Image: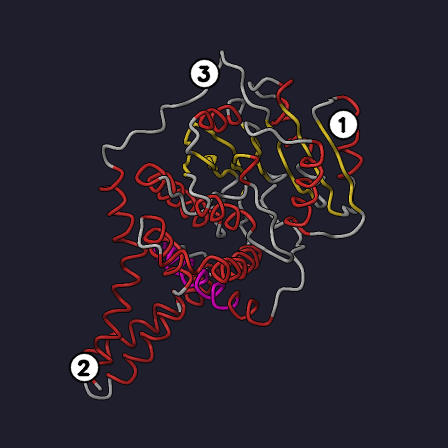
Amino acid sequence: MLLTLQIIYWACVLLLLHSYVLYPLLLRVFASGQKDNEVIYSRGEQLPRVFILMSAYNEQKVIREKLDSVLDTSYPLDRLAFCIGSDNSSDTTNEIISSYAAKYPQIRFTPYYERNGKSGVLNKLYTQLKAQGIEDSDVFILTDANVFFTRDCIYEMVKHFKNPSIGQVGGNVLNNGQRGDGISVQEATYIQRENMIKYREGLAWGAMMGAFGACYAMRADCFSPIPPNFLMEDFYISMSILQQGKKAISEFKAVCYEDVSNEVTEEFKRKTRISTGNWQNLGVYWQMLFRLDAVAFALLSHKVLRWMGPFIILLMLAASGILMLSMPLYGVLFVGLVLFCLSPIAETLLKRLGIHIALLRFIAYFNLMNLALLYGFYKYLTGVQTSAWSPTKRNV
């Protein structure tokens, strides 16, 4: 019994270390010496048609800047269409987009007068485009209203689709608006690390584990309609592309900027929604874990073990809690783990005193993420009734 519990405890430690430490280190080795895709469209060639798909809900604060960033592109405007669906917006979003659509033929605007959620709007936009006729060479770019493109962002993603093996290209989402008094620094640091992991997955195996929904490009004929009430449509689409046998990569030159939230409560809600969507995706794609290939290894190491993180931690607490009755070492480990898990409370109290300890803030962030994963699992079990949600309050 005691030996079994010890094995369980240290196996849990290894699983967490593998996902957060060993796997990124292994990726550096696997990606070392690998070349970026070199089969690309040059600027002098006839470039593919690009359709940018976006769902907007009450985005009056950012929609002008979004539209301007897309229109101010180095990509040929005669090869570009910006298809926007307003998800029953109740502010001035519709009026602003309509005023732009009257000036720019590239903008195709469809207002919807009931909430569909982001995935529902994307499905409707896709259905409209499919009815109009989609060519094999056409490219979709999916993006959010609060993500602003640089001039070359579109071209840098689209250039890769000359290579027929590539089905998806993720943009390089950089964060601005960071403030030192909230959670934005931790979130931006996490996203930067994720950008590098995704890039190396694409470089090593062509198996980027989920493009950031903020900005990515894909072959139009690879689009799979998103199931009803799905919250993480970006990961669903990414896995569908890999399931179709296409490669998914990341392009660092495809730079775009996104503001991150500084409020803990807002970020917790967002992480909970992401967690719920992750479990939805696992319910669809769990069989891909048994492919015994690089995609399965990346999915398990980068995603599934992280999603299981709160359960692994709870198992460590239970195992060490029982073992400490017989073995003093595990009493120390149990107390240490409890204190580790209580870090968000300590960080909050110290912040009120004006004390900021960088390491403690990142530990607290890690634990809040795992708490959101746990709550998201509960929400998944109780059932997702809609994919509609309000934009996260960011540092606009």
Q: Are marks 1 and 2 in contact (CB under 8 Å)?
A: no
139, 5: nearer the viewer? 139
Give left or right: position of 37 versus 2: right
Q: Which type of secondary structure does the marked residue at label 3 adopt?
A: loop
Residue type pointed to by label 3: Ser
Residue type pointed to by label 1: Ala
Gap in Å between the C-alphas at discs 3 and 1?
30 Å
Residue carrying label 3: 42
Quarter in which the N terminus is drawn: bottom left
Q: Where is residue 16 in the image (x, y as percent from the top left)?
A: 31, 62
Instruction: Report the span colored magenta.
Output: 357-375
Residue type pointed to by label 2: Leu
Q: Residue 101 carries which label?
A: 1
59, 42: nearer the viewer? 42
Q: Which type of secondary structure does the marked residue at label 2 adopt?
A: helix
Q: Is residue 301 magenta?
A: no
Q: Which of marks 1 and 2 is nearer the N terminus?
A: 2
Q: Residues within 10 Å of mark 1 (few under 14, many from 20)?
A: some
How many marks overall?
Answer: 3
